[in-house]
Amino acid sequence: MKMEQALKIVKEQLTEHRYQHTIGVMDTAVELAERFGANVEKARLAAIFHDYAKFWPKAEMKSIILDQNLGDDLIHYGTELWHAPVGAYLIQKEAFINDEEILQAIRSHTTGRKGMSVLEKVIFLADYIEPGRHFPGVEEVRELAKENLDDAVKQSIINTITFLMRRNQLVYPGTIHTYNDIVHQQGGNNA
């Protein structure tokens, strides 16, 4: 699918603000893919579609998650996580994108997962550091992303978990597993 066609499809699903975020994620994902050796075209397409379901009604997303077995455990955590697996499901059904690497990158972009591919890490990180993002800790992650993909992903997870814990919010176990997996791969203790 050509970039212009993908952007047109996605624009119909998003607010103007979220569409601008998507453009930022796309540009960042392409940059990261070139830097760390992921497929640039797949990174571009995954970035364009990563928030496809962002504004779907929560009741519909919940129904899709349960009906399609997209991870029932997600239901017990923040609704902000739901649009990722639902988006992957919907773009396969509605935009006819069947590339499993792209779908998996979209599916895991909010939570991460153990054993993430380079493409998944690129989309996960691009969503976190795109130029429109402004929050404490993002500059540190942007700096890490210039040199080491895993260090940048790990720090973004640390920031997210810390943020959630300070707000007394639940942390999705898959995100902790992602952190543990990266630490393990980097030779961390108890591995």
Image: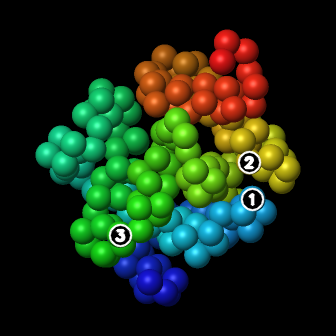
Label 1 Cα crowd, 10 Å radius (few <14 / some 14-19 / many 20+): some
Label 3 Cα crowd, 10 Å radius (few <14 / some 14-19 / many 20+): few
Q: Which residue is labeled 3 in the image?
A: 98
Residue lying farthest to the top in this orientation: 190
Q: Do the residues labelled 1 and 2 touch (CB within 8 Å)?
A: yes
Instruction: Report the quarter where the C terminus lies.
Output: top right
Locate residue 121, reporting x and y percent. Answer: 61, 50
* Residue mark closest to the camera, 3 vs 2: 3
Closer to the camera, 40 or 111? 40
Closer to the camera, 133 or 5? 5
Q: In this view, does 25 lie above or below 12?
A: above
Q: In this view, does 163 lie above or below 14?
A: above
Question: Residue at 30% of width from left, 75% of height from top?
Answer: 96
Q: Quadrant of residue 100?
A: bottom left
In space, the residues marked 1 and 2 are separated at their CA atoms by 7 Å
Q: Which residue is labeled 2 in the image?
A: 149
Identify the element where label 1 is drawn.
helix
Question: Residue at 44% of width from left, 84% of height from top?
Answer: 1
Q: Are marks 1 and 3 in contact (CB under 8 Å)?
A: no
Q: In this view, does 184 lie to the left or right of 19?
A: right
Q: Which residue is labeled 1 in the image?
A: 36
Q: Which amino acid does label 2 sit on?
A: Leu
Question: Residue at 24% of width from left, 68% of height from top?
Answer: 93
